[in-house]
Image (tube, rainbow, N blue to C red):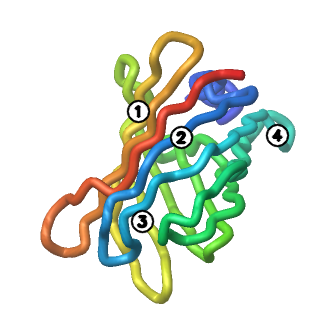
Amino acid sequence: MDSPVDELRHLLFFTGAWEGTGAFEATELTPPFSQPVIRVEGSIRLGGQWLEQRFTWIEQPDSGGPRMAEALRLWGYSPGRRLFVSEWFDSIGRRGTVTSPGWRGDELVADTEISHAGRQIRAREIFTRYGDSSWRHAAEMDFGRGWVPTDEQVFHKL
């Protein structure tokens, strides 16, 4: 059985400094809004057991959407479940619990359960890497009537 530290090497792609932009679609939770410039800092932390990603919203036009300021995501590996696991938290009070089998080619699909304002919402996150210097994050949520695209961002390595 591989150790969490050994498996975490598959997520080293996300380390370093990244910057990107994107947009959110209208959903039951938010109106549509253009997303500002987002900076992401990724580093291996806590004895090599976790990949930490810190998201900071650099520019944020008043577009009717929530006023995000920052988010934190920790990625690890569960040898017993043979899955990557993640928890994320943001500055508007949301929390996500995530599992993924890992990369399949250049795509990593993660099943996510979001806790927000007393609700539990199923989500799916799709990470697509483009070479060594950019990646795309797309998400969709199921509000009980099937999957709905909710947001998409593209990041480039700084």
* Most foreground residue, 89 or 58: 58
Looking at the rendered structure, the kind of residue marked 3 is: Glu
How far apart are the two marked residues, 2 and 4, measured between alpha carbons? 26 Å
* Residue in front for this viewpoint, 57 or 140: 57
Query: Spatial distance from mark 1 to mark 3, Cα to Cα?
Result: 16 Å
Q: Badges 2 and 1: C-beta atoms under 8 Å apart?
A: no
Q: CA distance from mark 3 to mark 4?
A: 24 Å
Local SS, label 1: strand
Q: Which residue is mark 3?
A: 113
**Residue located farthest toward the top when viewing the structure as drawn:** 131
Labels 3 and 4: the sequence-earlier one: 4
Spot occupied by residue 51 in the image (x, y as percentages of width and height): 70, 39
The answer to whether residue 106 is above or below residue 38 is above
Residue at 68% in and 69% down: 91
Residue under the point 48% across and 75% down: 115
Q: First in sequence, mark 2 or 1: give its number.
A: 2
Q: Amino acid at mark 4?
A: Arg
**Residue type pointed to by label 2:** Thr
Q: Determine which residue is flagged by label 2.
A: 21
Q: Secondary structure at mark 4?
A: strand
Gap between marks 2 and 1, in whole Å? Answer: 20 Å
**Residue type highlighted by circle 1:** Leu
In this view, the residue in front, 100 or 13, is: 13
Mark 2 vs mark 4: in front: 2
Q: Quadrant of the N terminus?
A: top right
Dot 4 alpha-carbon crowd within 10 angstroms: few under 14, some 14 to 19, many 20 or more: few
User: Mark 2–mark 3 contact, CB under 8 Å?
Assistant: no
> Quick one: which residue is furthest to the bottom in this view?
118
Task: Say which of 82 and 147 sits in front.
Answer: 147
